[in-house]
Amino acid sequence: MVQEEVNAKTVALSVKGIKITGRLLAKAMQEFLKQARKSKSSPPVKHGNQSIRTLTKQGASLSSIEVTGDNIGSFRKTARKYNVDFALKKDSSQTPPRWIVFFKAKDVDALTAAFNEYSKAALVKKKKPSMLKKLQKYKERSKELAAPVKNRSRGEREK
């Protein structure tokens, strides 16, 4: 029984050379193993944002969702977090332009979770005023509160 397992795992390796050393044999075995790993491994599967063509080549059935929004590109960060394979396609024929998100059918649950998180983040960002608007508001307040500056040339105050 043990002998059968050993026989099944035997590998034939032929090396031509004048003087075969242990190092040469080890190097030949390493090269053989490297080639064996290359032949067994399939090309790496791409994840995250990709083209529609690449997504269809992966063999899974595709689903799509129509989304409107100007900053749908920032959705990529959230989708990457949930490891969703997707493709974005912009349809400019309508005003405002709409986005179609293609994704693998098996990623439906992950995609809905990613969309929920993205929409929550977008709402929070919309409610929060921008720093430039805050700065402008404080500039106006400081002008109202500041005392008039003396004009040094005439010794008078400016209004």
Image (spheres, grey):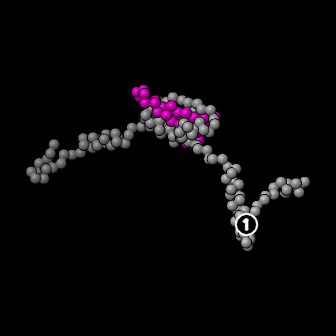
Task: Specify whether 153 is left or right of 81.
Answer: left
Asked which quadrant contains residue 3, the reply is bottom right
Q: Position of residue 122 (x, y in %)?
A: 47, 35
Asked which quadrant contains residue 54, the reply is top right
Residue furthest right as drawn: 1
In the picture of the structure, the residue carrying the numbered disc 1 is: 16
Q: Nearer the viewer, residue 143 or 135?
A: 135
Quadrant where the N terminus is found in the figure: bottom right
Q: Nearer the viewer, residue 38 or 139?
A: 38
Q: Is residue 148 above or below residue 29?
A: above
Residue furthest left as drawn: 154
Is residue 140 found inside the magenta-colored segment of the image?
Answer: no
Crowd band around label 1 with a 10 angstrom C-alpha radius: few (<14), some (14–19), many (20+): few
Confirm whether residue 106 shows in the render: yes
Q: Position of residue 123 (x, y in %)?
A: 46, 34
Tag 1's secondary structure?
A: loop
Task: Specify whether 80 is left or right of 26.
Answer: left
Q: Nearer the viewer, residue 123 or 3?
A: 3
Residue type (three-letter) at the residue carrying disc 1? Lys
At a point 54% along the width and 36% down the height, the residue shown is 52
Task: Specify whether 116 is left or right of 59.
Answer: left
Task: Specify whether 20 is left or right of 156.
Answer: right
Q: Position of residue 157 (x, y in %)?
A: 14, 47
Write the start and end of the magenta stretch as one range: 79-108
Q: Nearer the viewer, residue 85 or 25?
A: 25
Q: Is residue 55 above or below residue 156?
A: above
Confirm whether residue 124 shows in the render: no
